[in-house]
Image: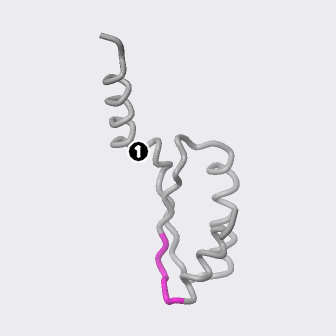
Amino acid sequence: MSPSLAECARALYAEGVRRLRIVPVFIGAGGHLRTDLPQAVCDLEARLPDLHIAVDPPIGEQPQVLAAIAEAIARCAPR
Protein backbone atom coordinates (compact mmCIF):
# COMPACT_ATOMS: atom_id res chain seq x y z
CA MET A 1 0.00 0.00 0.00
CA SER A 2 1.30 3.41 -0.86
CA PRO A 3 2.34 5.61 0.74
CA SER A 4 3.84 3.42 3.43
CA LEU A 5 4.04 4.36 7.09
CA ALA A 6 7.77 4.97 6.67
CA GLU A 7 7.20 7.24 3.66
CA CYS A 8 4.56 9.26 5.51
CA ALA A 9 6.70 9.52 8.65
CA ARG A 10 9.77 10.65 6.69
CA ALA A 11 7.74 13.27 4.79
CA LEU A 12 6.23 14.63 8.00
CA TYR A 13 9.66 14.59 9.65
CA ALA A 14 11.08 16.61 6.75
CA GLU A 15 8.34 19.18 7.42
CA GLY A 16 9.43 19.49 11.05
CA VAL A 17 7.01 17.08 12.74
CA ARG A 18 8.60 15.40 15.78
CA ARG A 19 5.51 13.80 17.35
CA LEU A 20 3.51 11.19 15.47
CA ARG A 21 0.33 9.49 16.64
CA ILE A 22 -0.74 6.30 14.91
CA VAL A 23 -4.38 5.24 15.21
CA PRO A 24 -4.73 1.79 13.61
CA VAL A 25 -8.06 1.53 11.79
CA PHE A 26 -8.59 -2.16 12.46
CA ILE A 27 -11.39 -3.94 14.31
CA GLY A 28 -8.88 -5.83 16.45
CA ALA A 29 -5.19 -6.47 16.98
CA GLY A 30 -4.21 -9.14 14.46
CA GLY A 31 -0.79 -10.04 13.08
CA HIS A 32 -0.17 -6.68 11.44
CA LEU A 33 -0.67 -4.82 14.70
CA ARG A 34 1.14 -7.34 16.88
CA THR A 35 4.18 -7.87 14.66
CA ASP A 36 4.41 -5.64 11.59
CA LEU A 37 3.49 -2.30 13.16
CA PRO A 38 5.82 -2.59 16.18
CA GLN A 39 8.69 -3.52 13.83
CA ALA A 40 7.91 -0.58 11.54
CA VAL A 41 7.81 1.79 14.53
CA CYS A 42 11.09 0.36 15.85
CA ASP A 43 12.73 0.86 12.44
CA LEU A 44 11.49 4.46 12.25
CA GLU A 45 12.69 5.26 15.77
CA ALA A 46 16.12 3.87 14.88
CA ARG A 47 16.34 6.04 11.75
CA LEU A 48 14.72 9.15 13.26
CA PRO A 49 15.69 9.07 16.95
CA ASP A 50 14.11 12.42 17.82
CA LEU A 51 10.72 11.43 16.37
CA HIS A 52 8.34 10.46 19.18
CA ILE A 53 5.82 7.86 17.99
CA ALA A 54 2.69 6.95 19.97
CA VAL A 55 0.52 4.02 18.87
CA ASP A 56 -3.11 3.92 20.01
CA PRO A 57 -5.06 0.68 20.41
CA PRO A 58 -6.93 -0.43 17.28
CA ILE A 59 -9.95 1.78 16.68
CA GLY A 60 -12.23 -1.27 16.91
CA GLU A 61 -11.10 -1.96 20.49
CA GLN A 62 -11.72 1.55 21.79
CA PRO A 63 -14.68 1.77 24.21
CA GLN A 64 -16.58 4.42 22.25
CA VAL A 65 -16.39 2.37 19.05
CA LEU A 66 -17.43 -0.81 20.85
CA ALA A 67 -20.40 1.05 22.35
CA ALA A 68 -21.41 2.37 18.92
CA ILE A 69 -21.17 -1.13 17.42
CA ALA A 70 -23.29 -2.58 20.24
CA GLU A 71 -25.87 0.19 19.76
CA ALA A 72 -26.03 -0.46 16.00
CA ILE A 73 -26.51 -4.18 16.61
CA ALA A 74 -29.25 -3.52 19.16
CA ARG A 75 -31.09 -1.23 16.71
CA CYS A 76 -31.05 -3.95 14.05
CA ALA A 77 -32.21 -6.74 16.38
CA PRO A 78 -35.70 -8.14 15.72
CA ARG A 79 -38.24 -6.96 18.24
What amino acid type is highlighted by mark number 1?
Gln
Spot occupied by residue 28 in the image (x, y as percentages of width and height): 54, 41
Q: Does 38 sit above or below residue 4?
A: above
Q: Is residue 49 magenta?
A: no
Query: Would residue 68 appear left or right of 55 to someone viewing this image?
Result: left
Q: Does 76 sit above or below residue 38?
A: above
Magenta segment, prevailing SS (helix, strand or loop)? loop
Which residue is rendered at x = 40% and y = 44% of the image?
A: 62
Q: Is residue 19 magenta?
A: yes
Which residue is rendered at x = 47% and y = 42% of the image?
A: 60
Which residue is rendered at x = 53% and y = 54% of the image?
A: 24
Determine which quarter of the picture holds residue 69: top left
Query: Would residue 66 appear left or right of 31 to someone viewing this image?
Result: left
Which residue is rendered at x = 67% and y = 65% of the image?
A: 40
Q: Nearer the viewer, residue 24 or 48?
A: 24
Q: Nearer the viewer, residue 79 or 11?
A: 79
Determine which quarter of the picture holds residue 39: bottom right
Determine which quarter of the picture holds residue 79: top left
Query: Would residue 37 appear left or right of 24 to someone viewing this image?
Result: right
Q: Which span is picked out in magenta?
A: 15-20
Kindly state the secondary structure of the residue where label 1 is placed: loop
> Circle 1 sits on which residue?
62
Q: Residues within 10 Å of mark 1 (few under 14, many from 20)?
A: few
Q: Does 51 sit above or below residue 41?
A: below
